[in-house]
Image (tube, rainbow, N blue to C red):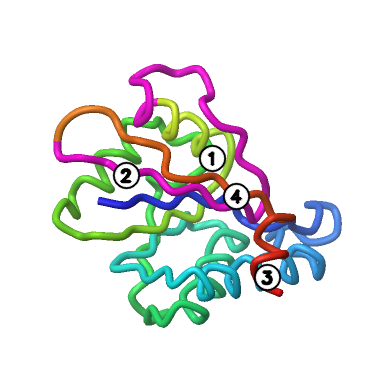
């Protein structure tokens, strides 16, 4: 199973909007990441988002760009910022058999999920940025392999 981890795009401060939607710049960068995902030929059989607005908006942009039905995005507490890595991984593993999954979530949980999948530990294994994209290959048993990790700047270049 290919697991794609993506931190939501930059958002407005809580003082400006308590719901903290994507900022205009954050939306623009997520749209570039989504275009890059399309250029790379990424297709997802499942897109997962946290209940937070910025995560759902990020998931929707990625879904539209890659041909995934927005109405099928799975919103779950397992993708929240403070969700234990095991909870997120267990949620993903409920969909074992799918080839490609995207999780749009938050820090610190995404770095903890990556660490747990890659090393079985808790120390961050990759630095995840807003609107960056990481692909892990998770076998049925054993640790995942890091296929690639792209920063927003690299994804912008791919998007053209």
Residue on which the image places disc 3:
32
Cα separation between marks 2 and 4: 15 Å
Question: Looking at the image, is mark 3 or mark 1 earlier in the sequence?
Answer: 3
Q: Residue at x 62, y 61 (%)?
A: 54
Horizontally, is 99 left or right of 107 in the view? left
Q: Residue 154: say if magenta.
A: no
* Relative depth, front residue between 37 and 22: 37
Q: Residue 130: say if magenta.
A: yes
Residue on which the image places disc 2:
137
**x, y percent for residue 121:** 39, 17
Question: Looking at the image, is mark 2 or mark 1 earlier in the sequence?
Answer: 1
Q: Measured along the vertical axis of the image, is residue 74 above or below residue 83?
A: below
SS at circle 3? helix
Residue on which the image places disc 4:
150
Most prominent secondary structure in the magenta stretch? Answer: loop
**x, y percent for residue 146:** 42, 38
Front position among marks 4 and 3:
4
Q: Which mark is residue 17?
A: none
* Relative depth, front residue between 3 and 11: 3
Q: Is the C terminus in the top left, top right, bottom left or bottom right quadrant?
A: bottom right
SS at circle 2? strand
**x, y percent for residue 45:** 29, 68
Cα separation between marks 4 and 3: 12 Å
SS at circle 4? strand
SS at circle 1? loop
Q: Tell me, yes or no, whether the two marked residues, 4 and 3, touch with CB atoms within 8 Å.
A: no
Cα separation between marks 2 and 1: 22 Å
Front position among marks 2 and 1:
2
Q: Measured along the vertical axis of the image, is residue 7 above or below residue 82?
A: below
Question: Looking at the image, is mark 1 or mark 4 earlier in the sequence?
Answer: 1
**x, y percent for residue 154:** 69, 55
């Amino acid at each position: 199973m290919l697991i794609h981890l993506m931190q939501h795009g930059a958002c407005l401060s809580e003082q400006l909007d308590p719901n903290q939607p994507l900022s205009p710049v954050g939306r623009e960068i997520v749209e570039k990441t989504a275009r890059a995902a399309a250029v790379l030929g990424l297709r997802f059989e499942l897109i997962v988002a946290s209940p937070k607005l910025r995560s759902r908006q990020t998931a929707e942009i990625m879904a539209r760009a890659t041909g995934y039905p927005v109405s099928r995005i799975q919103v779950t507490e397992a993708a929240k910022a403070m969700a234990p890595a095991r909870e997120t991984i267990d949620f993903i593993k409920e969909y074992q058999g799918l080839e490609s999954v995207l999780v749009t979530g938050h820090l610190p949980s995404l770095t903890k999920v990556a660490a747990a999948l890659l090393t079985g530990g808790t120390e961050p294994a990759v630095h995840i940025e807003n609107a960056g994209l990481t692909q892990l290959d998770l076998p049925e048993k054993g640790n995942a392999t890091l296929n690639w990790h792209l920063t927003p700047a690299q994804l912008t270049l791919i998007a053209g």
